[in-house]
Amino acid sequence: MLPVLQIGPLALQMPGLMYLAGIWFGLSLAEKFAPKRGISADKLYNLVFTGLIAGIVGARLGYVLLHPSAFSAAPLSLFSLNPGLLDPFSGFVAALLASLVYGQRQKLALWATLDALTPFFAMFMVGVALAHIASGEAFGAETSLPWGIELWGAKRHPSQFYELFGASLILLALGLRSKETSLPTGTLFLTFITLTASARLFLEAFRGDSTLILGSIRAAQVVAWLMLAAALWVQQQIARGKAD
């Protein structure tokens, strides 16, 4: 794991760089794909940056509300670049709301826009996996298997590399499916959700930092089941509507 890369006096936070790389490459892919879905690349860029800015601000404010004592002694920490001082759920809600407002004002078709953004989402998930490799977060459960890695004082499943492998396969599968010319609008995005949720259901079993509910149920797998069911149901409705 390499959380910080020291180059002379310069200390680079590698997890943050991996996130940025995922965003940059993802936007590059989405820019090339957007015209095929009738979406302006400029509007797509603006939508993503609106969501990112709102997400970062919302994530920091959410963390402040949840942990006010972390900032009372050092108020300038509010502007810290430390990604550990962000609340993911608050960031997601803020990004979603800001994106919906922007999309509505620009009269962007919802499903076509989500299809155009699918390469961005898929590439960003690769960036997330690389960030986890750099930071050591999302670590695996203890194992005696020969490919286990030494991390946090124990031999563990290399769950971060499992995550990277899964995200890369999903990106490849979406790239192949995007070449199909008769896909109904929304299918590509729903395929991404289906594959990502399925991967999470499987890979979560190897995690050593899972949040448990009711004693032994992994919260991430519950969310993945709900996402998978919703995505399959919507795909069925789209297919039925096309058949009718």
Image (spheres, helix red, strand yellow):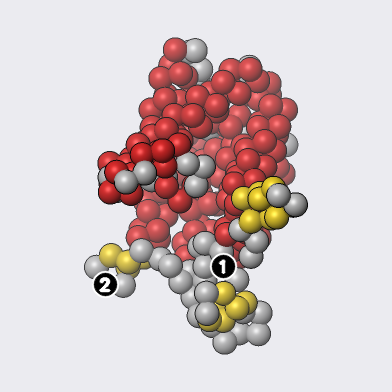
Taking depth in this image into account, of 117 and 237 the one nearest to the observer is: 117
Q: Is residue 46 visible?
A: yes
Identified at 50% across, 36% down, the residue is: 239
Q: Sequence order check: which comes first, mark 1 or mark 2? A: 1
Q: Is residue 180 visible?
A: no
Taking depth in this image into account, of 196 and 27 the one nearest to the observer is: 27
Determine whether the residue tagged by mark 1 lies in a helix, strand or loop: helix
**Structural crowding at the residue carrying mark 2, measured as other residues with C-alpha within 10 Å and reported as few (<14), some (14–19) or many (≥20):** few
Label 1, label 2: how far apart the Cα atoms are: 22 Å
The picture places residue 128, in percent across and down from the top left corner, at 58, 50
The picture places residue 62, in percent across and down from the top left corner, at 33, 40
Q: Is residue 4 above or below residue 68?
A: below
Which residue in the structure is indicated by mark 2? 215
Q: Is residue 168 above or below residue 189?
A: below
Identified at 31% across, 72% down, the residue is: 216
Query: Callout 2, which amino acid?
Result: Gly
Q: Which mark is residue 159?
A: 1
Q: Residue furthest bottom?
A: 144
Q: Is residue 67 left or right of residue 76?
A: left
The picture places residue 123, in percent across and down from the top left corner, at 64, 43
Q: Quadrant of the N terminus?
A: bottom right
Identified at 58% across, 17% down, the residue is: 43
Picture quadrant of residue 96:
top left
Picture quadrant of residue 112:
top right
Q: Is residue 133 left or right of residue 85?
A: right
The picture places residue 133, in percent across and down from the top left corner, at 62, 61
Query: Callout 1, which amino acid?
Result: Ser
